[in-house]
Amino acid sequence: MTATIKDIAKAVGVNPSTVSRVINGTASISEETKEKIMQAMKELDYHPNSLARSLVNGNTFTIGLVIDAGNKDAFSNAFFIQSVIAIESVAQSKGYSVLITNHSLSDSNNIKNLVQERKVDGIILPVQCMTGELIDLMTSSNFPFVVMGEPQDKRADICWVDVDNEQGSRQAVECLIKSGYKSPMLLVENRKTIFENKRIKGFEDECKAQKIKTCSIHTFSEEKIEKLIDEIQKKERETDSVICSNNVIAFKVLKAIKARKICVPKQIGVITFDNYPLAEYMEPALSVVDVDTYKMGETAAELLFRSIRGKEKKIKGRLVDVAIIERESTERKTK
């Protein structure tokens, strides 16, 4: 026979209303009582009826996670997967489920329906899916949401989470200087994105702070990389180290360097953003600016639940710290 709230209350010695409040999180109950109730629920194999809970307090106990339908590789992206795992873990710990939905800039009706029909209690969406229309809809209806990625438009009513890209570039330059390099180069993929612009700013600021006179920034293309490495080999360019914005760029750089029989790290150092999926398996193993996308997803979820519970009305943007992992590609011996 299926256990009921009355069975739990009887086993613990409390009123059924106390058990209900613990399940729904609608009142302050002592930790000791909570633990006894949770233990009784486990022993009696009690599972709350989600529909009944929704009818009682108006919550769906579900949050929405929006993915970019235009990015066909989203689910194969190791960084995206880490964020999803973190969001799911936080939601599960709060007694919530995660509903994943697609979005494209040409059709945002699916998100509008979730918000207007209150099918979820809050939404996490990537910055590339953020439109003024959607933000206006969610803010005007006081609907909790968090943006993954730093937006161009930092309105006071937008809560966002991103990794600290400026910090990442600064730390990469510091790592190279400490290892004995003097003239770094930054290779980025797309100067139009805010995260690449943040990396450029961090690079420029740290080069200035370190009083580095010879440094340069270039946009990635295979032809450009070939030309740059040729110039380095012929000593037409003083560059002695390269900071790559991702693993793909780093792979192409190493390939061009090896083709010219230039020694890494003795003649040129290489460091890349992102530890996964390739950095530690390249030859030589690459030093990295480790971007913690699990922490990014975890932070986004925690902020969303704070908003759902009304504990903080105005939550500003949050930056997640990065860390340097040093490997063979920057192990140049200083004199």
Image (cartoon, rainbow, N blue to C red):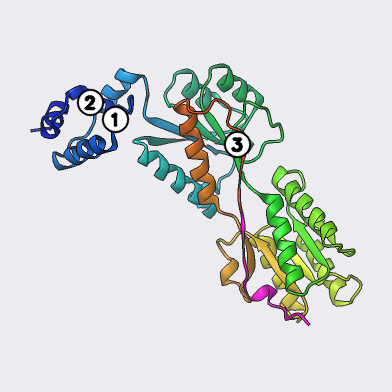
- Residue shown at 49%/18% (left/top)? 116
Side (left or right) of 152 relative to 122: right
- Residue shown at 55%/35% (left/top)? 125
Residue 253 in view, yes or no: no
Residue 4 included in the magenta stretch of the image: no
Residue extent of the magenta highlight: 322-335
**Disc 1 element:** loop
Q: Which labelled disc corresponds to residue 29?
A: 1
Residue that label 2 marks: 18
Viewer-closest of 215 and 246: 215
Quarter of image, res 42: top left
Tell me if mark 2 has few (under 14), some (14-19) or many (20+) residues whose alpha carbon lies within 10 angstroms of its own.
some
Q: Position of residue 118 (x, y in %)?
A: 44, 21
- Residue shown at 62%/31% (left/top)? 130
Side (left or right) of 74 relative to 37: right
Residue that label 3 marks: 160
